[in-house]
Amino acid sequence: AAGIDASGVHISEENQSSVSVVLCRPDGQRHFAYYGKANNEFDGTAITDELLSETKLLYIGSMMSLKGLEYGPLRELFARAKKAGAMTAMDATWPADGIWLPKLESALPYCDIFVPSFDEAKELCGTEDPREIVSFLHSKGVKIAGVKLGKKGVFIEDFELPAFNCENVVDTTGAGDAFMGGFVTGIATGRSVYDSALLGSAVSNCCIREIGAVSGAPDMVRAEQVIEMFRNGTLR
């Protein structure tokens, strides 16, 4: 009904759907209870070359919690996507077993966009300096690299963009994912890296004003309004 093509959806014959339960403490800290199941089966082979040929950008969220893609399978999927002419992007999450870079290192030469969170990036790259994080990811083959800095904003390539003002933060669940949604949309539609970061920041700003990860998701008109308010200093 929303116009989304669901023809590529696969149904697991063995496992239930994945479930994530977010537990929010009064101080804003969150804990995630994650039940992988069907997600763990996904190894990329269900995405056909035909589907990839019709794709502008392939985005893999929550690497480190998709067991079927760890190590080689993510590389194979991204390599097929690049061969088909699609851009590639991914995000990460905290691995339960504490293993970081080995799980996705071989895929990085085929990754166009990777902007992990600060806590994830320092584990992956072995440094807390945003410029060094970007340099490390570039050295591994990532084309557009950065690091999300939470309430400080984001550092991408060679610039830092401060977080958009929000005087009444309701729930930060999904803020990083919201940023990535806006950012990759910007890149896929031909915006510059900076303008794409503005779009990502606007989407994230809308997200944290509502309870839940998707309740505050804006349309493009609203996102552009938020960007304009950020630019003229009227965003509250």
Image: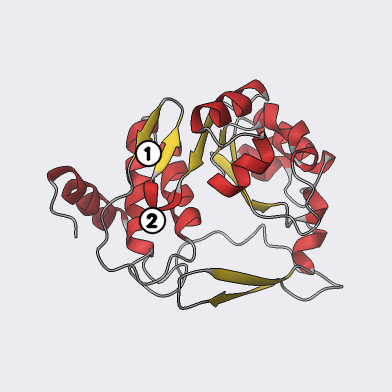
| Residue that badge 2 annotates | 204
* Number of numbered callouts drawn: 2
Upstream in sequence: badge 1 or badge 2: 1
Q: Nearer the viewer, residue 12 or 115?
A: 115
Q: Residue 77: x and y, percent?
A: 74, 40
Residue 174, compared with residue 48, is above or below; it is below
Give the class, few, some or many, for how many residues have Cα within 10 Å of label 1's Cα (few <14, many ≥20).
Answer: many
- Vertical relation: 64 (above or below) 136: below
Q: Name the one closer to the observer, 81 or 119.
A: 119
Judge by depth and name the residue closer to the eye, 117 or 207: 117
Residue drawn at 46 percent across, 62 percent down: 3
- Tag 1 near tag 2, CB within 8 Å: no
Give the foreground label among 1 and 2: 2
170 vs 102: above or below: below
Task: Answer left or right for 223 relative to 118.
Answer: left
Say which quadrant the C terminus sits in: bottom left
Residue type at tag 1? Ser
- Which mark is on residue 102? none
Q: Is residue 135 visible?
A: yes
Q: Name the residue nearer the viewer: 165 or 203.
A: 165
Element type at mark 2 = helix
Disc 1 designates what residue? 196
Q: Residues within 10 Å of mark 2 (few under 14, many from 20)?
A: many
Q: Residue furthest right?
A: 14
* Rendered location of residue 231, percent (x, y): 18, 43
Q: Quadrant of residue 48?
A: top right
Residue 12, how many percent across, how many down?
Answer: 80, 69
Type of the residue with mark 2:
Ser
Residue sitting at 39 percent across and 40 percent down? 186
Q: Residue at x 40, y 72 (%)?
A: 215
